[in-house]
Image: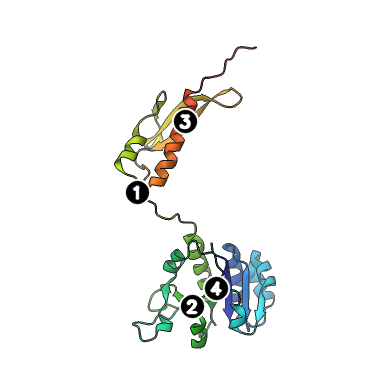
Amino acid sequence: MPDIRVVVVGPKFEGNVGAIARCMANFGVEDLVLVNPCEIGETAMNRSKHGDYILRNARTVTSMEEAVEGCLLVVGTSGTVTKGDKNYARIPVDVREFAMDCRGYNEKIAFVFGREDIGLLQTELNRCDVLITIPADDKYPVMNLSHSVGVILYEMFQANRRPVRCEPCDGREKELLRRPLGGDRLQRGPEGIHHRHVQTHDGQGHPHQIRIQHDNGRFRRCRQDNQELSGERHEMGRKMKAPLPSSRSP
């Protein structure tokens, strides 16, 4: 996941700040900067739970410029979506789309969140490189501040856990995987799963069974997965051909 800084401008309720620290801990983000915040006390600390260390290490500054210093990309957040193109500064990108585009990005990113009541001012939005939003029902699209932080960090975290979609395997590759391993035996198991039992031995010469579970209804759809499975099959074949050690004493 990219190196992320959470910047909160003018928070009015310390409980929200504590909840933000807790969300950050959930997703492994530790850099929190507060711009002209309310007083941060016991309520915030209690809300932060196991994210209390983030709250203790949070920096307090007096301007947004200070808060985003050292970040190559500054991302503003807004619950208000402009319809049309009359105000370019207020046309946001869907957070999930943005998160997917950031996969592999190695520079520091600042996510800037505004006040609970009015959000970010226009001058603050103009300082941002991009504006993102969380899709919600038109009747009530503005989320709680700490909830917004949680959703955005989740999307960033999840996007970097998803593998890039790879090239599908072709018919020839699938057919190679359908060929049974020589010398093994097939047994019908529960829920349609077959178990291939291969007689082999480990490094100490004691026989053991290697069981490969293969679900007939879920052949690998991805060429990369097929290559990995082919490698596993090759290794099983190599072990099957290796001679068993003699059980006679020297």
Quadrant where the image shows the C terminus: top right
Amino acid carrying label 2: it is Asp
Give x and y (percent) for residue 133.
44, 74
Lower position in the chain sequence, tag 3 or tag 2: 2
State the residue in front, 28 or 250.
250
Kindly state the secondary structure of the residue where label 4 is placed.
Answer: loop
Say above or below: 168 vs 81: above
Lower position in the chain sequence, tag 4 or tag 2: 4
Gap between marks 4 and 2, in whole Å? 9 Å
Gap between marks 3 and 4, in whole Å? 49 Å
- Residue that badge 4 annotates: 72
Say above or below: 181 vs 88: above
Task: Give residue 26's mark.
Answer: none
Say above or below: 163 vs 179: below
Q: Residue at x 51, y 87 (%)?
A: 123
Gap between marks 3 and 2, in whole Å? 53 Å
Task: Give residue 236's mark.
Answer: 3
Structural crowding at the residue carrying mark 1, measured as other residues with C-alpha within 10 Å and reported as few (<14), some (14–19) or many (≥20): some
Amino acid carrying label 3: it is Met
Structural crowding at the residue carrying mark 4, measured as other residues with C-alpha within 10 Å and reported as few (<14), some (14–19) or many (≥20): few
Amino acid carrying label 4: it is Leu
Lower position in the chain sequence, tag 4 or tag 1: 4
Lower position in the chain sequence, tag 3 or tag 4: 4
Mark in the foreground, 3 or 2:
2
Give x and y (percent) for residue 165.
40, 54
